[in-house]
Image (cartoon, rainbow, N blue to C red):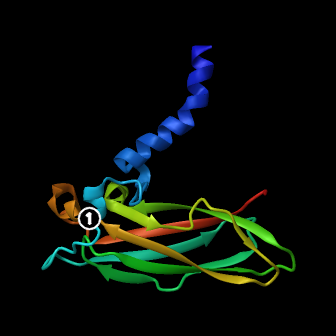
Amino acid sequence: MGVLGLSYAAVPLYKIFCRATGYGGTTQNGLDSDSATRQRANEAVLGARQLCVQFNADTAGTMPWKFQPQCRKMYVVPGETALAFFTAENTTGNAEVGVSTYNVTPFKAGVYFHKIQCFCFEEQVLGPGEKVDMPVFFFIDPSFLDDPHMKNVNQIILSYTMHRSRS
């Protein structure tokens, strides 16, 4: 019984572990963070090095949508909030439901990447031929600059994959 219980708890526990540690490129959610973290989102570190944030978008094999970032990269300073947009277009003659997953590379930078607003894990319903712009509002925690493991990291890639949802 104990093993069966642990097997059911494994996925939620793994998600909690990934969010807490940034393991596997899991980003942090700025809204769930403490007030000190939210405050750091508005405190760009003056004179700090800029980081290049690149955006990638893919569709799973069964997803009949066009999905792409509106810009391929932007430069940000840790602590500075930034807004990026992705565009999804339903290329079919039927309504389709999609949901996206994401990751950040290098994986070790995921713990510093805070999303304030994101379309990920939310079902997107697009009618035939419909096109929509989806925002991602984010910042990189200024403590990124204090981590010796981030010394040589100058580029972060935020990658999304859009999947067809069964809903």
Determine the secondary structure under disc 1.
Answer: helix
Corner quadrant of residue 46: bottom left
Q: Residue at x 31, y 53 (%)?
A: 34
Outermost residue to the left: 47
Q: Is residue 109 left or right of residue 5?
A: left
Q: Indicate whether 6 appears above or below 98.
A: above
Q: Residue at x 46, y 76 (%)?
A: 55
Rendering coords of residue 27 (x, y %): 41, 57
Residue 157 or residue 123, whichever sits in front: 123
Rendering coords of residue 124 (x, y %): 68, 68
Rendering coords of residue 144 (x, y %): 23, 62
Residue 107 or residue 114, whichever sits in front: 114
Q: Is residue 106 left or right of residue 60?
A: left
Q: Residue at x 35, y 63 (%)?
A: 113
Quarter of the image for the N terminus: give it: top right
Corner quadrant of residue 151: bottom left
Outermost residue to the front: 35
Quarter of the image for the C terminus: give it: bottom right
Corner quadrant of residue 45: bottom left
Badge 1: residue crowd in 10 Å (few <14, some 14–19, many ≥20): few
The amino acid type found where label 1 is placed reads Gln
Q: Residue at x 41, y 69 (%)?
A: 157
Rendering coords of residue 50 (x, y %): 23, 78
Outermost residue to the right: 93
The residue to which callout 1 is attached is 39
